[in-house]
Amino acid sequence: MKYILLMSGTRTGVEGYHAWSKQDLEAHMAALKRIHKDLTASGEFIAEQGLAEPGEAKAVRGEKNGVPVTDGIFPESKEFLLGYWIVEVANAERAYAIAGRISAAPGPGSKPINMPIEVRQFATYESKSQ
Amino acid sequence: MKYILMMNTMKAGHGVPGWPKKDLQAHIAFMMGLNKELHERGELVSAEGLAFPDQAKLVRAGKDGRPITDGVFPESKEFLAGFWIVEVDSPERAYDIAARISAAPGPGSVPLNMPIELRAVMSAPPQEMV
């Protein structure tokens, strides 16, 4: 079963990361690297990706005279995707456990952030036909 | 440059299962045709659909590091329905692809003109963080 683990945040929340000390940032990245290593070793890793900051985001809606209609203005409350992990696991509980580890990655002062991670299964024939 | 094109939906707005079969088939045929074309141009990195939002879970690490799952989301929450990752020469080409996805046919073959969120994907973490 394939799952995507989505890490999201509001624009204001993302800008909070800029205030982290270098040491805290390094500890955070090191924890994510360990998770990456463990998932690779267990054969569950498929992909992970960080996204550029929300300031770069565009919403595209249809075309006008063959030109895409783009908009860069989003509501303050909008949650932007910051990054994701795609894993192939034996069951949903394992996906939740991995999400829990990501959630507990350290933030400022080495405290676990306990940020919410959205866990979504990839569509399969079964889930589409429900 | 890599971009992720995200098709978002509200839980209530996820009316796709109620479409007539003919309209659903036309929609899927459009998406498959587009994916084939992107693949042939060497621009398609991946395309995935996600299971419906009612199966989504939010996971946070608890004090003991165990995952705490929650399936209750605000009505206004946007859910990711599917995404494309493309590798293109310019942002404009990514906007063009997003506009084509946006204009995918809906009920009665009318273009949906749904908003597609477009975000640059980071190629690698900053060197000092690795």
Image (spheres, coloured by chain):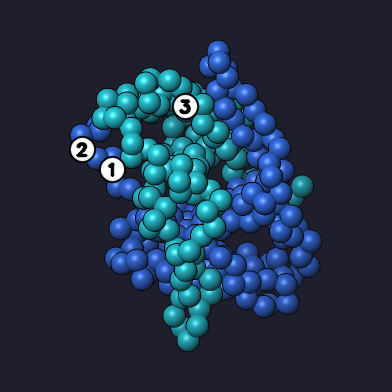
Chain colours: A cyan, B blue
Q: Please tell me which residue lies in front, B120 or B41.
A: B120
Number of numbered discs visible in the structure rendering: 3
Label 3 element class: loop
Residue A1: quadrant of the picture: top right
Callout 1: 10 Å neighbours few (<14), some, many (20+)?
Answer: few
Q: Chain of mark 2?
A: B
Q: Chain of mark 3?
A: A
Whether labels 1 and 2 belong to a single chain: the reply is: yes
In the image, B110: left or right of B82? Answer: right
Q: Which mark is residue B124?
A: 1
Marks 1 and 2 sit apart, C-alpha to C-alpha, by 8 Å
From the image, state whether disc 2 or disc 3 is nearer to you: 3
Whether labels 2 and 3 belong to a single chain: the reply is: no
Q: Position of residue B98 (x, y in %)?
A: 48, 67
Query: Residue at coordinates 38% horizontally, 20% vertically from top-left?
Result: A110
Label 3 amino acid?
Ile
In the image, B93: left or right of A80? Answer: left
Q: Please tell me which residue lies in front, B15 or B66.
A: B66
Label 2 amino acid?
Gln
Q: Are marks 3 and 1 in contact (CB under 8 Å)?
A: no
Label 1 amino acid?
Ala
Q: Please tell me which residue lies in front, A83 or B27.
A: A83
Whether labels 3 and 1 belong to a single chain: the reply is: no
Callout 3: 10 Å neighbours few (<14), some, many (20+)?
Answer: some
From the image, state whether disc 3 or disc 1 is nearer to you: 3
Where A116 falls versus A56 (above or below)?
above
Callout 2: 10 Å neighbours few (<14), some, many (20+)?
Answer: few
Q: Chain of mark 1?
A: B
Marks 3 and 1 sit apart, C-alpha to C-alpha, by 23 Å
Q: Which mark is residue B127?
A: 2
